[in-house]
């Protein structure tokens, strides 16, 4: 389980290096905080900085923005806690990532590439697209011959 979280943190780190919108950056922060809390029981500025490959002052600035927007509770030199709103966003991103990863693996794409691609596009897909992808995955799983004939 810890390996899974560590792997997700590394893939978020890689994707964060690419050009992002402010909203997708905020989602990355929420996702990293959520993963760190599940992995270690807490999140701190130093860990967030390391996993997103940004300076500690940049992390502090974003944490303040996320706090102001109601995504987390942040007090300098104290813990970082996601609010219900922040947890919902983090969980939604995690679900999108899982659905995309599963779909890409069904296509025969190796795990590392699938993980990197999922991390790169998860912030940009409409919920309707994700729902349809999920339905398609269920269809493929219930019709294994279709998937076998593709592969």
Image: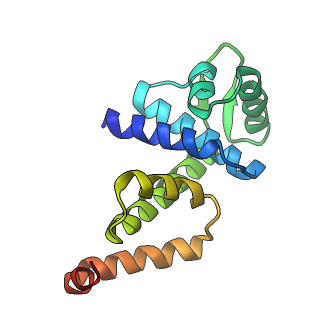
Q: Report which quarter residue 52 is drawn in.
A: top right
Say which of 58 and 72 sits in front: 58
Residue at x 54%, y 54% (from the top left corner): 93
Nearer the observer, 29 or 51: 51
Can you say which quadrant of the picture contains the C terminus?
bottom left
Q: Is residue 94 left or right of residue 110?
A: right
Q: Is residue 45 left or right of residue 7?
A: right
Residue at image location 68% in from the left, 51% down from the top: 24
The quadrant holding residue 102 is: bottom left
| Residue located farthest toward the top when viewing the structure as drawn | 77
Q: Quadrant of the N terminus?
A: top left
Measured from the top left, where is residue 96 in percent x and y? Answer: 50, 60
Q: Residue at x 23, y 85 (%)?
A: 149
- Residue 151's place in the image compared with 71, above or below, is below
Residue 135, given in percent of the width and then of the height, sits at 41, 79
| Along the line of sight, the residue nearer the viewer: 107 or 141 | 107
| Residue at the (67%, 30%) spot, across then down | 73
83 is higher (above) or lower (below) than 127: above
């Amino acid at each position: 389980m810890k390996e899974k979280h560590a792997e997700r943190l590394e893939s978020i780190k890689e994707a964060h290096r690419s050009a992002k919108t402010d909203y997708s950056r905020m989602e990355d922060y929420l996702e990293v905080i959520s993963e760190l809390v599940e992995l270690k029981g807490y999140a701190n500025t130093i860990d967030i900085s390391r996993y997103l490959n940004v300076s500690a002052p940049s992390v502090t600035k974003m944490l303040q923005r996320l706090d102001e927007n109601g995504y987390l509770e942040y007090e300098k030199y104290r813990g970082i806690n996601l609010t219900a709103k922040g947890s919902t966003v983090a969980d939604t991103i995690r679900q999108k990532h899982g659905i995309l990863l599963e779909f890409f693996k069904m296509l025969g794409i190796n795990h590392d590439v699938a993980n990197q691609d999922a991390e790169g596009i998860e912030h940009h897909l409409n919920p309707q697209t994700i729902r349809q992808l999920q339905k398609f995955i269920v269809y493929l799983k219930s019709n294994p011959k279709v998937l076998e004939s593709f592969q």
